Image: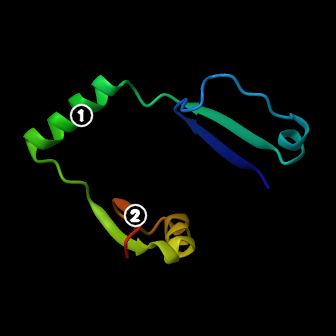
Amino acid sequence: MTATIFVVGFVSGMALSIPILPINLKTLNIVGSNTGSTANLADAVRAIATTGIKPVIDRTFGFEQTVDAYRFLESAAHFGKVAIDLDA
């Protein structure tokens, strides 16, 4: 089984020391994600608020239905976003 780990942000700094063998044995992929700057986010929020853009949400799952949500995503039967409501 292959898995991908996405690294988003650097909350605890940019240095990392981890053993490589477990990553190789499990064929893990580690991918960095550049999500942009805080200014980019502020621009995006402003543009969304100004234009009234609303995301298309196909279906919302409760937190305890997370496995079902991932199965639904895997089925590719959705149109738009699949959301997990942490308060449901």
Tell whether 52 sits left or right of 88: left
Total marks shown come to 2
Point out residue 44 in the picture as x, y percentages from the top left corner. 24, 34
Q: Residue at x 28, y 23 (%)?
A: 39
Give the image quarter of residue 30. Answer: top right
Cα distance in 3D space between marks 2 and 1: 21 Å
For badge 1, the amino acid type reads: Ala
Q: Which residue is drawn at 86% across and 35% down?
A: 19
Element carrying mark 2: strand
Nearest to viewer (mark 2 / mark 1): 1
Q: Please say if 77 is above or below 9.
A: below
Pick whichever, 57 or 18, lies toward us: 18
For the C terminus, give its image quadrant: bottom left
Instruction: Identify the residue position indicated by label 2 in the image.
Output: 82
Instruction: Identify the residue position indicated by label 1 in the image.
Output: 44
Point out residue 86 in the picture as x, y percentages from the top left corner. 41, 67
Q: Residue at x 17, y 41 (%)?
A: 48
Q: Which residue is drawn at 36% across and 59% down?
A: 81
Q: Please say if 72 is above or below 16.
A: below
Tell whether 29 sits left or right of 9: right
Point out residue 57 in the picture as x, y percentages from the top left corner. 30, 63
Element carrying mark 1: helix
Tell whether 4 sits left or right of 76: right
Coloration of the structure image:
rainbow
Pick whichever, 60 or 15, lies toward us: 15
Earlier along the polypeptide chain: callout 2 or callout 1? 1
